[in-house]
Image (cartoon, rainbow, N blue to C red):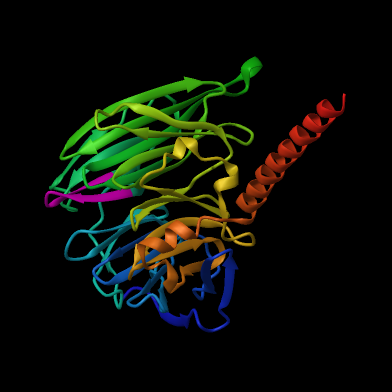
Amino acid sequence: MLGKTNITTLSEGGIVTEVEDFRWIQGQSGIRSDFVKAIFQNGYIVAITADGAIVYSADGEVWEVVRPDAEGCKLNDIDWDGERFLLVGSITEEGGAESGKKGLIMSATDFKSLVKINDLPYNEYFSIFPQNGKYSMLAQKGDTIYILFTDLTENGTQETQLEIKGKYFQHSMSAKSTNGAIVCVQSYEYGFGSTAGIVSNYIDIVKVNSNNVRKIHTSTGARNPSIISVFECKDIFYLMYLQDTDNYKLSKVTGSDEIMTVCMGQNFAFKNGVYFNGCQIFINNHEMMVVRKEENIADKALGDLIEIAPEATMNCIIRAFGRLYIFGNQGAILKSSAETNNEEAIVVQTLSAKKALADAKRYTDGQFAVLEARIAALEGATE
């Protein structure tokens, strides 16, 4: 068994918060780490943190924590292959002949034990995607980034070097849908001497599906917009770009692998999304956007955001047990109240303090315009 377990419940010290009609229960998971990924599969909600904690629950009420018994553990992704959970990341060992960063792959069924899978010769794994009996993985070896198609053994692994434009790898992000996975790799070129510093930023976007790797976009430039998040919602891939301060662009990947701008210029900064009761729901650090099936996100404005976690930072949202669960920084977990477990709840719960103020201003402006018209009419009648 790799790791030790402790148990907490949301009812202990839980705080009920309410934003208009949308009620949430906020509680701690027993850790103080930042969540990076969460899934609901095989009757378990499971969330992982960058520093190696695994938080899981079989009912959404009582949470257990297990940590791999490994030095310098970092977790990047988790998935379910139909029989077991797979977790990937890296460990960093100090001292001795075996020192340095090494890729980590683990499996679990009920999280009472974590099984380390035989080592493959890579330094870190960034994502894992089960498909057609094998696994697609994004990995790093030395300074090179690879897409792997593997059965998790060395002999059953084929690698495709990912040709990225920048010389120096910066970081990667990925998302998965029923049709495949999308990988975004950001890299840069560094100048020396009179041009010291980063001279070009690069973004390479790759689609991975059934042993097929195809690059669908490359962009470059000293002021090239950064992608801050990649996520799936309603089986659609979304890319959130930061163009400059408080100026974001949301794009989606079409079925023909084109990247289409959905909206731009709004300070949305979405980090994750989920499809729930006929609505697309997007979250940023502190707020939520609800887009009903008859609405278009391109028509949304800042006033439509619902403030959910003003004192916490949200990272990922999933649906489980007929509710919504949000995982954030410092071990925070938000669980929606039972009222959200029906179609009408989302419809009526789209008011926030910001939207209420915007609606009040529109109403006041309208009434003032009517009053001005009446005054003008009275003045005209007396002339």
Q: Is residue 20 above or below residue 243?
A: below
Quarter of the image for residue 47 reads bottom left
* Residue 132 locus on image (x, y percent): 12, 49
Q: Is residue 40 left or right of residue 358?
A: left
Q: Is residue 202 above or below residue 289?
A: above
Quarter of the image for residue 175 reads top left
Q: Residue at x 20, y 39 (%)?
A: 209
* Residue 194 locus on image (x, y percent): 66, 15
Would residue 108 be counted in the magenta stretch?
A: no
Q: Residue at x 36, y 61 (%)?
A: 343
* Residue 16 locus on image (x, y percent): 57, 75
Q: In the image as oriented, which residue stretches furthest toward the front?
A: 382
Please name whichever residue, 291 or 161, is drawn nearer the observer in this view of the structure: 291
Q: In the image as oriented, which residue stretches furthest toward the right?
A: 383
Q: Quadrant of the C terminus?
A: top right
Please name whichever residue, 20 or 235, is drawn nearer the observer in this view of the structure: 20
Q: Residue at x 54, y 42 (%)?
A: 268
Please name whichever residue, 243 or 353, is drawn nearer the observer in this view of the structure: 353
Quarter of the image for residue 368 reads top right
Asked if one can make out residue 170 in the rendered structure from this viewpoint, the answer is no
Asked if one can make out residue 20 in the rendered structure from this viewpoint, the answer is yes
Q: Is residue 133 above or below residue 215?
A: below
Q: Residue at x 47, y 81 (%)?
A: 9
Which secondary structure class fits the magenta region best?
strand
Q: Is residue 164 left or right of residue 128?
A: right
Please name whichever residue, 318 or 147, is drawn nearer the observer in this view of the structure: 318
Q: Quadrant of the N terminus?
A: bottom left
Q: Which residues are magenta?
A: 127-137
* Residue 137 locus on image (x, y percent): 27, 46
Q: How many marks?
A: 0
Would residue 128 be counted in the magenta stretch?
A: yes
